[in-house]
Amino acid sequence: MKKSTRNATGEHLKKSALVAIGIDLGDRISQYVALDDRGEQLFEGRVPTTAAAFQARFGSLGPTTVAIETSTHSPWVSRLLSQLGHRVVVANSRKLRLIYENRNKNDRIDAEYLARLVRLDPKLLAPVEHRSQTAQQHVAVLRAREVLVRTRSRAIGHVRGAVKSVGMRVPSCSAEAFVKRASPVIPPLLEPALRPLLKMLEQLNTQLATFDRQIERLAQDTYPEAKLLTQITGVGPLTAVAFISTIGDPGRFTHSRTVGAWLGLVPARRASGQSDPQQRITKEGDGYLRHLLINCSHYILGPFGPDCDLRRHGLAIAARGGKNAKKRAVVAVARKLAVLLHRLWRTGEVYEPLRNTMRRLTAA
């Protein structure tokens, strides 16, 4: 295959129509390869992974199809290239075994594979849709809060373990009350090690309260539809804002039942011939939102969960017994909860906790 020079001239581009560009995004330098309508390489090159460099290099090209992979830089790169008039296809990196299992792998080859795949059929890239810049800003608040929550949990676990190691115990309490309950029982020999952690926990609690107020304001002012989702007991402003900002547009799903699969809450399949073994859930999609829905499911099935169709469905699965029956029940409730949240969001209906139960009774 005859290749052109690295920096093709404008005359060359006129002779061969540019139809696809593959860009392998790097943290500092990105590699790109361009193909024409016959699948031959027009030009290739490297460009700094900055907005100014991308605009200078790809802004002068006519509208074409550009393929990139999901990465840290893919959200802003996809928005920038779209503003320049290009059609951007963001490939799901988890689905491209052709690239990540290639034994002859480098940035140029990865970029060329992206270009060839998007030229043949964009669906081969399992394209994903990034959230908007505003939604990304709001999700950053949710993720920052999650980092603080995990940090607080690790610090509390460390303090409890250290106190137990000298024959004492911190009384059971909530995370917010831990500092108050733990301070009197810290032994003198552990004061230099644990007292700074208790001060840090106080600061974490203050910052988490600030984040919670900020999320409540988002639910009231920016996402008024969150009120539809918080009708369900166990779903708070945090989960509602995460659900809306992650999905973005409820119309992207024609059927609400596909939301569960999109979030990776359905079993994977590896059927071949007569064999169709039971698999774990796929865990695709947004892991943070899936984690929040699982937490909501735990509450619904817990001792304080209200009587509703979701709870009855989960308890019925758990009652069947067998290995991991409770885990399967939690996942099943989380999947149905995702479907229900999308349904309420799309239709604006009033939530009826025992709607399905009453229908069955009426039919009987």
Image (spheres, grey):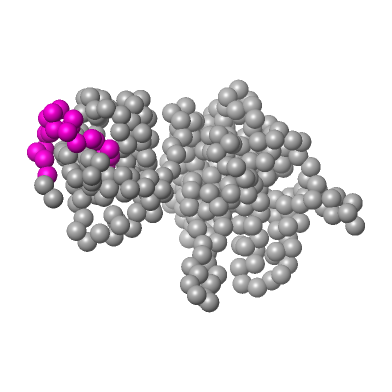
Can residue 280 be seen by looking at this rendering? Answer: yes
Q: Describe residue 146's horizontal placement relative to residue 318 as left or right.
A: left
Give the image location of residue 199, x and y in percent: 47, 38
When asked about the image quadrant of residue 242, the answer is top right
Residue that sits furthest to the bottom in the current view: 274
Give the image location of residue 253, x and y in percent: 57, 42
Instruction: Give the residue at x 66% y 60%.
Output: 329
Magenta-tinted stretch = 3-30
Give the image location of residue 48, x and y in percent: 20, 33
Instruction: Give the residue at x 62% y 45%.
Output: 255
Query: In the rendered image, which quarter contains the C terminus?
Result: bottom right
- Indicate whether residue 156 is drawn in magenta: no
Q: Look at the picture and state if 271 lies above or below 96.
A: below
Q: Look at the picture and state if 261 lies above or below 103.
A: above
Instruction: Give the residue at x 51% y 65%.
Output: 269
Front one among 256 and 246:
256
Can residue 30 be seen by looking at this rendering? Answer: no
Q: Describe residue 255's horizontal placement relative to residue 92 as left or right.
A: right
In this figure, what is the number of numbered marks?
Answer: 0
- Indicate whether residue 14 is drawn in magenta: yes
Instruction: Give the residue at x 71% y 70%.
Output: 320
Front one among 171 and 347:
347
